[in-house]
Image: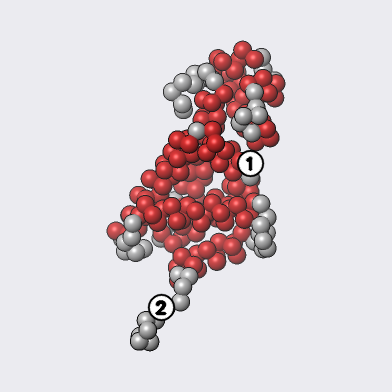
């Protein structure tokens, strides 16, 4: 939790805290960060304006908290699913599928996450840098076991994050065709990762 947030301890306080969180999530999605006031949040949460400041010193800190919570929830959901898989191939497939299904349940997450680029570039940078840092560890373990090629693990982490992000966007925003079949889409992604995209190159000698 953000160090400037006062964490609730009683049941009533926890319920109020959650009401503010949920209200902010909805209003940030609907109005955008800059179009949202603290009054909008407290009105939506059904609490007095002063109650907000019992837990959050500012709207920005609340937004940072929501962004961190999203990151934590996504990682937790993926970790729970991939932990049941043995190979890196199976883990990667399950991770992509889990992210897409999470995004289908909470499509507004794209708005909230990507808006951070225009609120505070460091927030946006840190969000993805933290994901990549954690991703790298799994890739390096897989490379050490000989499950994947030994390449620059940081670059690979961003490649895989980019694929997952935009495949999720395709499904959530219903871009193109076939978005109702998540398994079929993930199968195509995994075929690309497993077999590659380009056919064999031949030099001018025909070799």
Disc 2 to disc 1: CB gap under 8 Å? no
Q: Is residue 66 above or below residue 17?
A: below
Q: Is residue 132 above or below residue 183?
A: above
Question: Residue beneath label 1, please?
Answer: 108
For the point 66% across and 14% down, the residue is 48
- Sequence-wise, the earlier of marks 2 and 1 is 1
Question: Residue beneath label 2, please?
Answer: 201
Q: Residue 29 in the image: x percent, y percent?
A: 65, 36
Residue 111 can be seen in this image? yes
Q: Is residue 119 above or below residue 130?
A: above
Tell me where residue 36 sits by quadrant.
top right
For the point 60% across and 52% down, the residue is 169
| Quadrant the C terminus occupies | bottom left
Between 84 and 198, the one lying in front of the other is 198
For the point 62% across and 24% down, the residue is 20
For the point 63% across and 41% down, the residue is 108
Helix, strand or loop status at disc 1? loop
Between 34 and 29, the one lying in front of the other is 34
For residue 128, which numbered disc appears in the image?
Answer: none
**Snapshot colouring:** secondary structure
Tell me where residue 180 sits by quadrant.
bottom right
């Amino acid at each position: 939790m953000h160090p400037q947030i006062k964490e609730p301890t009683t049941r009533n306080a926890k319920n109020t805290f959650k009401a503010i969180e949920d209200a902010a999530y909805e209003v940030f999605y609907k109005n955008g960060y800059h179009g949202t006031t603290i009054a909008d949040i407290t009105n939506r949460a059904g609490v007095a304006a002063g109650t907000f400041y019992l837990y959050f010193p500012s709207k920005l800190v609340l937004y940072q908290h929501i962004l961190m919570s999203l990151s934590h929830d996504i990682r937790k959901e993926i970790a729970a699913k991939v932990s049941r898989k043995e190979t890196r191939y199976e883990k990667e497939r399950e991770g992509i599928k889990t992210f897409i299904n999470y995004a289908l349940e909470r499509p507004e997450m794209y708005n909230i996450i990507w808006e951070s680029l225009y609120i505070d570039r460091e927030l946006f940078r840190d969000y993805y840098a933290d994901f990549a840092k954690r991703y790298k560890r799994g890739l390096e373990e897989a490379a050490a076991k000989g499950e994947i090629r030994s390449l620059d693990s940081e670059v690979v982490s961003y490649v895989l994050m980019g694929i997952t992000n935009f495949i999720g966007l395709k499904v959530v925003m219903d871009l193109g065709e076939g978005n109702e079949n998540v398994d079929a889409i993930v199968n195509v992604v995994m075929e690309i990762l497993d077999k590659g995209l380009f056919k064999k190159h031949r030099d001018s000698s025909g070799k």
